[in-house]
Image: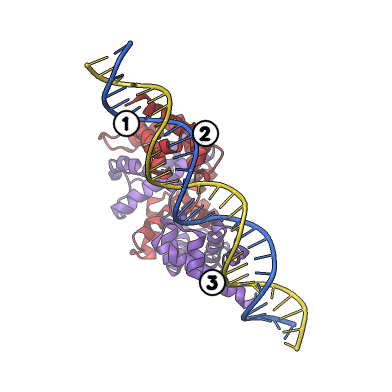
Chain colours: A purple, B red, C blue, D yellow
Amino acid sequence: MDRRQKKTRDAIFKAFSALLENKRYEHITVQDIIDKADVGRSTFYAHFETKDTLLKSMCSDIFDHIFEGEMCEYPTQTPQLEARLAHILWHLNDHKSDISGILSSESADLFMGYLKEYLAKLFKMHLSDFHTQTPPDFLLNHLVGSFGETIKWWVKNRMNTSSEDVAKYFIAVTKTH
Amino acid sequence: MDRRQKKTRDAIFKAFSALLENKRYEHITVQDIIDKADVGRSTFYAHFETKDTLLKSMCSDIFDHIFEGEMCEYPTQTPQLEARLAHILWHLNDHKSDISGILSSESADLFMGYLKEYLAKLFKMHLSDFHTQTPPDFLLNHLVGSFGETIKWWVKNRMNTSSEDVAKYFIAVTKTH
DNA sequence: AATATAATCGAACAAAGTGTTCGGTATTGA
DNA sequence: TCAATACCGAACACTTTGTTCGATTATATT
């Protein structure tokens, strides 16, 4: 790969990453990026079709690195899985600033954010039903987050499953004490 | 409230909802909305500061309705919670099209989407560790989704907890068999 | 029914962003 | 050295945004 290409690519990544620390993804413009990266407009579009493509490339770089060597078959035991998860989390530290920026974006998250406000109120009343050997805020986040993901799954599947069954499934995979 | 206001508000909601069925939230413009709603440009901005405000108002309408009467203290027992969750899911059917549209948005979801691809591969190897009385795709979605939410929580808390502890917490609240 | 009030219209506006093109310049790898 | 190619940068047409303002129109009230 041409040195110039790599240099430009890195400059764009770095600028994008820096911008993400102070600005939401949706509000960052290509103009912002090329200004910060000090790169010509046409050069940007020579590398990336769009802003989303840039994000995708960046994610691939990060994830390929983190999950490298993690994808082989292991004896499937929960302790082993736990170690793997810890390992992934450990590597994520290397990209702390990028990730923080990206995760603070909006949109479907706008919807989920509002939904979660209501779910949180609801689950708070039932916190004592569940496993309590974890910090309360972790537990609450887990319940709200995973039930939110359940709703996404359900909607994605065109709400084919009955609501009773979905609720049953959710209770089934979540540990009570 | 003036009839005209309500009429305009409804027209905008309806148009927005219709647009969401065929177009991602991020790509819908105010122009699209006022064209479909057949409403003056200035009228739109008289009602909503921005597109996000519109979404927020819409969400409030939906959630206030669904969670109405759900927010009082009950005897906190898991079967009772299960019924409540089912009830919420049931009501969500009334807003199927809106919700489907909103939940298909991108951005932070772009990042999470890529991350989840990797997580899914990983969890697939460990599926047999977990509770199996649910459909496999539900289980996989739950594990990937809730671990993704765990990562969000962790990042949001500035990664203060050690990665080992986070992994431990996650395993603790998730039911194995 | 008459009237004051308030919502809507529509056109125009500056500002900002998008994505593309193209001729010229500079760097690279062979 | 030299051909290939990556970059520059300016210009382009186009879209979107958010605001303004005077002219209409519908509304609630008396």
Going 45% across and 58% down the picture, which residue do you hit? A102
In the rendered image of this protein, does residue A151 appear above or below residue B160? above
Q: Amino acid at mark 2?
A: Lys
**Where is residue B24 shown, x and y percent of the image?**
53, 44
Regarding residue B134, the answer to whether it shows in the image is no
Residues packed near mark 1 inside 10 Å, few (<14), some (14 to 19) or many (20 plus): few
The span from disc 3 to disc 1 (Cα, nearest Å) is 51 Å
Name the amino acid type tagged 1. Glu
Task: For mark 2, name the chain.
Answer: B
The crowd level at tag 3 (other Cα within 10 Å; few <14, some 14-19, many 20+) is: few
Mark whose residue sits in front, 3 or 2? 2
> At numbered mark 1, what does the secondary structure look like: helix, strand or loop?
loop
- Residue C28 shown left or right of residue B145 in the figure: right
Chain to which the residue tagged by mark 1 belongs = B
Given contact means CB atoms under 8 Å apart, are the residues at marks 3 and 1 in contact?
no
Residue B168 is situated, as x and y percent measured from the top left of the image, at 38, 59
The number of numbered badges drawn on the structure is 3
D27 with respect to C14 (left or right): left
Q: List the residue tagged with mark 1.
A: B68
Q: Earlier in the sequence, mark 1 or mark 2?
A: 2
**Badge 2 density bin: few <14, some 14–19, many ≥20, Cα 10 Å:** some
Q: Which residue is mark 3?
A: A10
Q: Which residue is mark 2?
A: B36
For the residues labelled 3 and 2, the Cα–Cα distance comes to 43 Å
The reply to whether callout 3 and callout 2 are in contact (CB within 8 Å) is no
